[in-house]
Image (tube, rainbow, N blue to C red):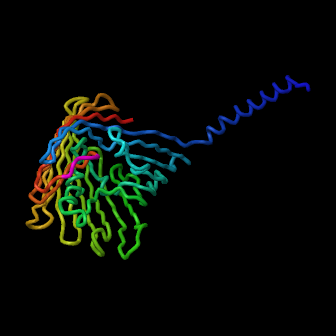
């Protein structure tokens, strides 16, 4: 059998030319931009639950994610994100895939952004300059969002409103007057099997012009405690950012529609000493759920943060809660901080490294 070598060479050359011509066309047709991102945040702590002192290696919401944007035109894009919590110090604490904000949606420069999937409710994301401490120092979670009260009052009688909801439809408006954004979110009760309807609704309006910030948010978890007993929340923030100094306050009222409610407040300040070193502090309290309940919680947190560069920072912190005689508030930012006996005062002194990429 004879092989026409010259003919085969020409055929291969023609095929390569076609592939080469098609490649730029395929590249131009594919306009989706993908980004891998994440954060590893670990610390070493000296802790106490009020009785027992421990040395702990702690993970602070480390995560890994991928996101993408497909631009139809300069004003309209399709977007997606899949984000998962990871625990490099103890893989048993790594989370289910896509357990953090994970969604698909459309983003319009003129009409805003609509998402469907798993996403933070508007009340949770409203912070301004009232938050921002790392490690165990996030008093907003414990006091303003009700995680401490949930434990102090009893999980069956009180829900916290730090909610990242599954099955949520979320809308965020475009920025009006270069400062105002409104958000609305709704999560139906897909698992409904009884007369209870545990759907969740939330909304917020926030103003931030770079110097002054403030906002108000509401959230309603229907039948959260029992039939007709919704968990209701209102949150207000105010703050300012002046050169190297920022300060913010957050207030909330949480009401379980069944005789239990708390009024809560946190104030946070930060001062940038130089281009790398920032000092932060928070003070706050969660009020009694009813007169004489003795389940109020006070908290204080301090942090020194040194940014080595834009991606890596080292920090030290001290946080302490003071529980009333019937309160069992505990620190919530790490994966495995121990529970607390009523009336005991947990604390943590530690140092951490945060690497964002």
Position in image of residue 343 (x %, y %): 10, 55
Quadrant (top left, top right, bottom left, bottom right) of the N terminus:
top right
Q: Is residue 302 visible?
A: no
Q: Residue at x 85, y 23 (%)?
A: 5
Q: Is 305 located above or below residue 187 in the figure?
A: above
The quarter of the picture where residue 8 lies is top right
The quarter of the picture where residue 252 lies is bottom left
The region drawn magenta spans: 335-339
Q: Is 158 located above or below residue 307 in the figure?
A: below
In the image, 299: left or right of 196?
left
In the image, 216: left or right of 17?
left
Q: What number of labels is visible? A: 0
Magenta residues: mostly which secondary structure?
loop
Position in image of residue 72 (x %, y %): 56, 48
Q: Nearer the viewer, residue 65 or 202?
A: 65
Position in image of residue 214 (x %, y %): 25, 53
Position in image of residue 3 (x %, y %): 88, 25
| Residue situated furthest right in the rendering | 1
Q: Residue at x 24, y 56 (%)?
A: 145
Q: Is 305 located above or below residue 344 in the figure?
A: above
Q: Nearer the viewer, residue 355 or 24?
A: 355
Q: Nearer the viewer, residue 310 or 298?
A: 298
| Residue situated furthest top in the rendering | 6
The quarter of the picture where residue 43 lies is top left
Quadrant (top left, top right, bottom left, bottom right) of the C terminus:
top left
In the image, 295: left or right of 95?
left
Q: Residue at x 22, y 29 (%)?
A: 274
Q: Is residue 223 visible?
A: yes
Q: Residue at x 44, y 56 (%)?
A: 117
Residue 336 magenta-drawn? yes
């Amino acid at each position: 059998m004879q092989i026409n070598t010259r003919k085969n060479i020409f055929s291969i050359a023609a095929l390569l030319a076609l592939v080469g011509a098609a490649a730029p066309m395929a590249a131009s047709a594919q306009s989706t931009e993908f980004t891998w991102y994440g954060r590893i945040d670990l610390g070493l702590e000296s802790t106490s639950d009020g009785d027992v002192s421990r040395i702990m290696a702690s993970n602070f919401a480390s995560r890994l994610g991928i996101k993408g944007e497909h631009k139809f035109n300069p004003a309209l894009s399709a977007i997606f994100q899949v984000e998962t919590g990871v625990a490099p110090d103890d893989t048993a604490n790594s989370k289910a895939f896509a357990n953090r904000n994970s969604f698909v949606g459309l983003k319009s420069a003129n009409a805003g952004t609509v998402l469907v999937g798993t996403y933070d409710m508007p009340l949770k994301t409203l912070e301004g300059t009232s938050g921002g401490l790392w490690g165990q120092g996030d008093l907003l979670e414990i006091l303003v969002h009700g995680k401490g009260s949930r434990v102090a009052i009893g999980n069956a009688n009180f829900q916290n409103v730090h909610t990242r909801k599954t099955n949520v439809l979320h809308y965020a408006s475009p920025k009006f007057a270069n400062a105002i954004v409104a958000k609305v979110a709704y999560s139906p009760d897909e698992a409904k099997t009884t007369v209870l309807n545990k759907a969740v609704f939330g909304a917020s309006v926030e103003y931030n012009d770079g110097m002054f910030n403030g906002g108000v948010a509401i959230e309603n978890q229907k039948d959260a405690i029992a039939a007709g007993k919704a968990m209701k929340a209102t949150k207000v923030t105010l703050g300012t950012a002046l050169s190297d100094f920022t300060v913010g306050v957050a207030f909330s009222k949480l009401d379980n529609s069944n005789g239990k409610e708390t009024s809560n407040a946190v104030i946070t300040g930060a001062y940038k000493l130089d281009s790398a070193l920032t000092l932060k502090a928070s003070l706050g309290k969660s009020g009694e759920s009813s007169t004489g309940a003795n389940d109020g919680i006070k908290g204080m947190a301090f942090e020194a943060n040194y940014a080595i560069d834009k991606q890596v920072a080292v920090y030290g912190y001290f946080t302490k809660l003071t529980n009333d005689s019937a309160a069992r508030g505990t620190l919530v930012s790490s994966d495995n901080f121990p529970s607390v006996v009523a009336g005991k005062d947990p604390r943590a002194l530690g140092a951490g490294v945060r690497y964002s990429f």
